[in-house]
Image: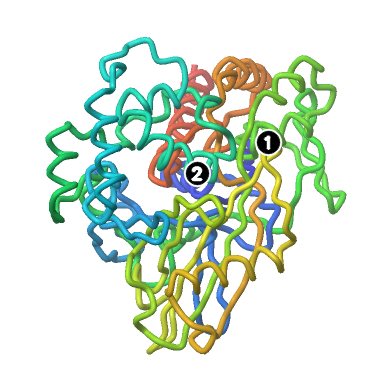
């Protein structure tokens, strides 16, 4: 039996790796010129930058051991900051209000105290969820503005199942204490964030990658689920017995021959963000002051800023440092600047924040990723289930963030690939038993 995997991101590599552990060979076909997907990286003049920002904070022992067997990791405390109207606050802002003016702190605290929806169990959207946790004033000034920048839609257009433990919900006592004094307590959904010491985030897959069959520059243009064949842009045709895909749901439906119109219609209800990554390298080692921080100001387009060189000094030449920012857009929110303008906007805004000067900057780069994050609009679950059910009936197994169309971190994507590998292994075992009979 021939098993084909589409996409060489962490879920595709994981699936192929776990199949190989059971003696089952597979071939991964990757449209890009390198493997790794969004966990990949690129290098400019000795500066290494990941394709979007990654840490691993898995508590699953098997996942952690697999990652660490490939690359020893640094352990970072999840200490982040927030930039708001020229003021720096510790993260999360909701219980670190101390640097704000007395007037704003008073409004935020009174909004918390007067919040009549705190125990509201009839939440219908994310805006209502935010206001139920933090009151109107803080919600409107902080997370609702960030939501528009990061998710590209207003908070009232998002449902809430995705939130989980990602947002800290402080008591009024915590809010009061954090408004009166600075404190060092970390209120994040993980106690540590790990990052490879060498080779960028992609190196957590090095051992898994060994011995796998990965064919690069293989873009799929048609999948025939009846004849079980895949046509690539180079006009090669491959047949399969088992097909596993990490191709985004919105894309794979366009590739399947004779797919029903109702499935294509459902795919239009799925929304994701795209993103620009702006990568900056500096001739000084001390430019970054924070491992990462969030920006709430609407007039500053980047939503998050990270430091690759603080994650690992291996990501920058000796004596140098780096920053990386993300700007998001979607079909619901288009940017009115071209790439050069976005790059210049980002550099100028970060200089206004007094992070660096022109003399410090020696590397600047901007590049676009078509798929960044799944957006949890109200229709996502129903439409996603219709599409996934159809694809499963066609014999296509789905893996990864965009294959499953879910909010999966890298460790969850790793387990997503393993889960389907286990399913295929089980089917092989069943076939062997049947053949023996």
Q: Left or right of 52: which side holds 239?
A: right
Q: Which residue is pictured at 22% across the width and 43% down the height?
A: 95
Q: Name the one closer to the observer, 218 or 423.
A: 218
**Residue at 64% of width from left, 37% of height from top?**
248
Query: Which numbered mark, 2 or 1, is in the foreground of this view?
Result: 1
Crowding at dot 2, Cα within 10 Å, few <14 / some 14-19 / many 20+, comes out as many
Most extreme residue toward the right is: 235
Q: Where is 99 relative to 62, above or below?
A: below
- Which numbered disc, 2 or 1, marks the residue that appears first in the sequence? 2
Q: Is residue 409 left or right of residue 256?
A: left
Residue at mark 2: 11
User: Disc 1 marks which residue?
Assistant: 332
Q: Position of residue 433 (x, y in %)?
A: 46, 21
Label 2's element?
Answer: helix
Q: Quadrant of residue 78?
A: bottom left
Res 348 → quadrant: bottom right
Q: Where residue 385 sits: x, y (%)? A: 58, 17
The residue at the point 29 percent across, 66 percent down is: 72
Q: Position of residue 2 (x, y in %)?
A: 64, 38
Q: Residue shown at 28%/51% (left/top)?
A: 91
> Where residue 390 is drawn, which disc sits there?
none
Residue furthest out toward the top: 122
Question: In the rendered view, does 71 fall on the left or right side of 329?
Answer: left
Q: Element type at marker 1?
A: loop
């Amino acid at each position: 039996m021939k098993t084909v995997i589409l996409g060489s991101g962490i879920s595709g590599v994981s699936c192929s790796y776990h199949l190989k552990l059971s003696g089952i060979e597979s071939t991964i076909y990757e449209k890009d010129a390198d493997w790794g997907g969004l966990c990949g990286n690129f290098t400019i003049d000795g500066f290494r930058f990941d394709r979007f920002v990654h840490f691993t904070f898995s508590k699953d022992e098997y996942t952690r051991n697999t990652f660490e067997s490939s690359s020893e990791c640094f352990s970072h405390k999840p200490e982040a900051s927030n930039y708001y109207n020229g003021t720096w606050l510790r993260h999360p802002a909701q219980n670190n209000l101390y640097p704000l003016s007395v007037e704003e702190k008073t409004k935020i605290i009174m909004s918390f105290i007067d919040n009549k929806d705190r125990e509201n169990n009839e939440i219908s959207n994310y805006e209502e969820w935010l206001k139920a946790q933090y009151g109107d004033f803080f919600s409107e000034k902080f997370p609702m503005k960030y939501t528009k920048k990061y998710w590209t839609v207003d908070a009232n257009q998002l449902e809430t199942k995705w939130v989980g433990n990602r947002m800290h919900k402080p008591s009024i006592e915590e809010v009061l204490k954090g408004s009166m004094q600075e404190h060092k307590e970390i209120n994040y959904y993980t106690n540590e964030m790990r990052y490879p010491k060498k080779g960028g985030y992609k190196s957590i897959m090095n051992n898994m990658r060994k011995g796998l069959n990965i064919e690069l520059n293989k873009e799929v243009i048609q999948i025939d689920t009846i004849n079980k064949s895949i046509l690539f842009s180079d006009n090669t045709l491959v047949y399969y017995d088992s097909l596993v895909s990490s191709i985004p749901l919105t894309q794979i439906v366009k590739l399947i021959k004779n797919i029903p119109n109702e499935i294509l219609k459902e795919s239009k209800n799925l929304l994701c963000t795209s993103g620009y990554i702006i990568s900056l390298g500096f001739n000084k080692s001390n430019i970054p002051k924070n491992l990462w921080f969030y920006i709430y100001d609407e007039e500053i387009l980047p939503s998050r800023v990270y430091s690759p060189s603080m994650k690992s000094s291996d990501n920058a030449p000796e004596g140098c440092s780096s920053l990386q920012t993300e700007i998001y857009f979607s079909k619901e929110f288009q940017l009115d600047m071209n790439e050069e303008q976005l790059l210049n906007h980002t550099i100028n805004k970060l200089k206004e924040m007094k992070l660096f000067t022109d003399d410090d900057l020696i590397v600047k780069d901007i590049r676009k990723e078509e798929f960044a994050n799944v957006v949890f609009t109200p229709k996502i679950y129903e439409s996603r289930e219709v599409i996934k059910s159809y694809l499963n009936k066609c014999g296509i197994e789905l893996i990864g963030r965009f294959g499953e169309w879910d909010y999966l971190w890298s460790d969850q994507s790793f387990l997503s690939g393993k889960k389907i590998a286990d399913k295929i292994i089980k089917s092989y075992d069943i076939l062997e038993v049947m053949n023996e009979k």
